[in-house]
Image: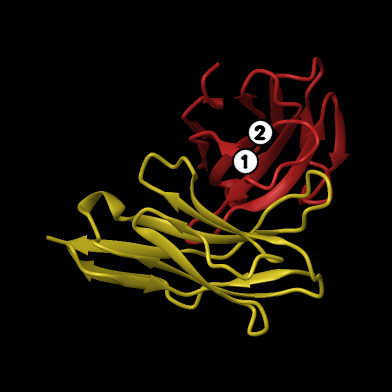
Chain colours: A yellow, B red
Amino acid sequence: AQTVTQSQPEMSVQEAETVTLSCTYDTSESDYYLFWYKQPPSRQMILVIRQEAYKQQNATENRFSVNFQKAAKSFSLKISDSQLGDAAMYFCAYRIPSGNTPLVFGKGTRLSVIA
Amino acid sequence: GAGVSQTPSNKVTEKGKYVELRCDPISGHTALYWYRQSLGQGPEFLIYFQGTGAADDSGLPNDRFFAVRPEGSVSTLKIQRTERGDSAVYLCASSPSGGTNYGYTFGSGTRLTVV
């Protein structure tokens, strides 16, 4: 069974600084998708960034980028120029590309941004 | 609608009572998922609908939980004889047919509290 591990229950960062959130996963599949979701107090899960395992290039979305290490099964999220609005729970998630398979989530990391 | 709508936003019920949680997906999305998010945890998969049928209900914890989607749009998650351990946020997500590598669009969830 696939598992997703987020080893940092809480992280904090100064406004305008950079922070990295860690995620590792376990799978025997060679092709899969990885995601980072943000969950603010409104509870809605918002997609931040995604990565396809067959792509070697790390995904980037504005201030958000990932460091995808397939051999190490590691998928960390880097947030640059942190803003107060980045404060939220962040969840790493995995799914295989077959049909509409469900997402498998980690336990999350609570990010605080200090002004 | 423009997004995934879940009602009620919050529900408090007494132990042993029956509850229904509603999810109204994005119009045209044929895939619908229910997840349960316990305090301090990531969302855990409950059930997945493709159209009107439950394509995968392997995440339902026991036979007190049941979900329907009779017309292939709105879905209702039903919990009988509620227990305090059922207290959680219940999230619904939808996606277009045929699978997607973009993850899903989530609603804001229903926070269920069993007292």
Crowd tier of the residue under label 2, counting other residues whose Cα lies within 10 Å: few below 14, some 14–19, many 20 or above: many
Where residue A35 sits: x, y (%)?
57, 57
Where residue B20 sits: x, y (%)?
65, 26
- Identify the residue shown where x is 44% and y is 51%: A38
Cα–Cα gap, marks 1 and 2: 6 Å
| Residue placed furthest toward the bottom | A72
Where residue B76 sits: x, y (%)?
70, 25
Q: Chain of mark 2?
A: B
Q: Label 2: which residue?
A: B94
**The residue under label 1 is which amino acid type?**
Tyr
Q: Label 1: which residue?
A: B104
- Identify the residue shown where x is 80% and y is 48%: B62
Q: Under tag 1, what secondary structure?
A: loop
Q: Is B95 left or right of A77, judged from the image as shown? A: right
**Between residues B28 and B54, which one lies in front from this camera angle?**
B28
Q: Let me know if residue B96 appears in the view.
A: yes
Tell me the quadrant of the picture where the N terminus of chain B can be found.
top right
